[in-house]
Image (cartoon, helix red, strand yellow):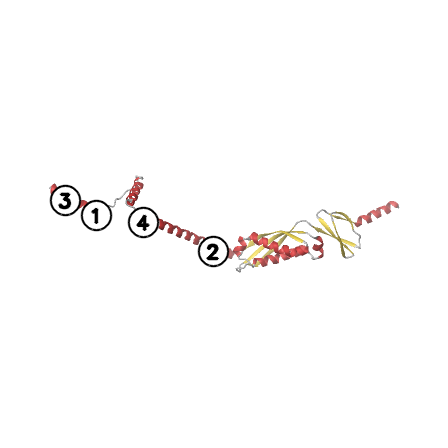
Amino acid sequence: MELLLGIIVIIVVLSFVRQVNQYERGIVLTMGKFSSVRGPGWTLILPVFQSMQKVDIRIKTVDVPEQEAITKDNIPVNINAVIYYQVSDVQRAILDVENFYYAVSQLAQITMRNLVGTVTLEELLRDRSSISEQIKKIVDLATEPWGIKVGDVDLKDITIPENLKRTIAKVAEAERERKASIIRAEGEVIAAKSIAEAARTMAEVPGALHMRTLQSINDISSDQSNTTIWMVPLEALRAVEAVGNFLGPKGK
């Protein structure tokens, strides 16, 4: 009889015991009112009078569902993100918000859509890390009263409709061609200036044109496969003809 009584007492006592793991904290309500936060280990809870809800304080990951948003330049995009957060105050996380996991997810969706509407598509694609940081700050500020600390936000995928992808690709190609044309034009301007400067130098410096001619002849003659055609000035031919006429009668 005593053994049976002892077993019953042990069972009753064990029914009062709750285990809180190292990564958890327990919120204890006594007769419906908050009474304490229990740390890791075994703790006693009086049935009927008390209840305990465990809260995981490890870093959690929320995969924000894909959201459709309109950028500042009226381009529709689908975007999703991942939020990393941690419960910093278990009392507020349980008592001040009904379901903090769902609340954080909904707040992140709204913030993401609103922020995408303030930037152009180019800014969204170029400054993804900066926009992620802005989302983090907004969500972290809003969830602070809930006892939630947002650690990081990462934009995962930004999806653009196929027809817009083709249009953007054409615009990018046109922009590259425009830049290439500008570079070619600038190169031609520089080359023209160099040629004009060289022409002025050869016109002003005595013998410069002859030196350039000799250099050109040297460059051409270095390759035996080249055929050189000499262009003799008309004045030189007339001078030779005059000399021939002068010597002609004497020769006879």
Secondary structure at badge 3 equals helix
The residue that label 4 is drawn on is: 200
Q: Earlier in the sequence, mark 3 or mark 1?
A: 1
Secondary structure at badge 2 equals helix
Secondary structure at badge 4 equals helix
Residue 96 point in image, percent of width and height:
70, 57
Q: Which mark is residue 104?
A: none
Q: Residue furthest left?
A: 252
Residue 205 point in image, percent of width and height:
30, 46
Residue 113 point in image, percent of width and height:
59, 58
Q: Nearer the viewer, residue 231 or 204?
A: 204
Going by the image, does 7 lie left or right of 196?
right
Q: CA distance from mark 4 to mark 1?
A: 24 Å
Q: Nearer the viewer, residue 181 or 240?
A: 240
Crowding near pointer 3: few (<14 within 10 Å), some, many (20+)?
few
Crowding near pointer 2: few (<14 within 10 Å), some, many (20+)?
few
Q: CA distance from mark 2 to mark 4?
A: 43 Å
Q: CA distance from mark 3 to mark 2?
A: 76 Å
Crowding near pointer 1: few (<14 within 10 Å), some, many (20+)?
few
Query: Label 4 amino acid?
Result: Arg
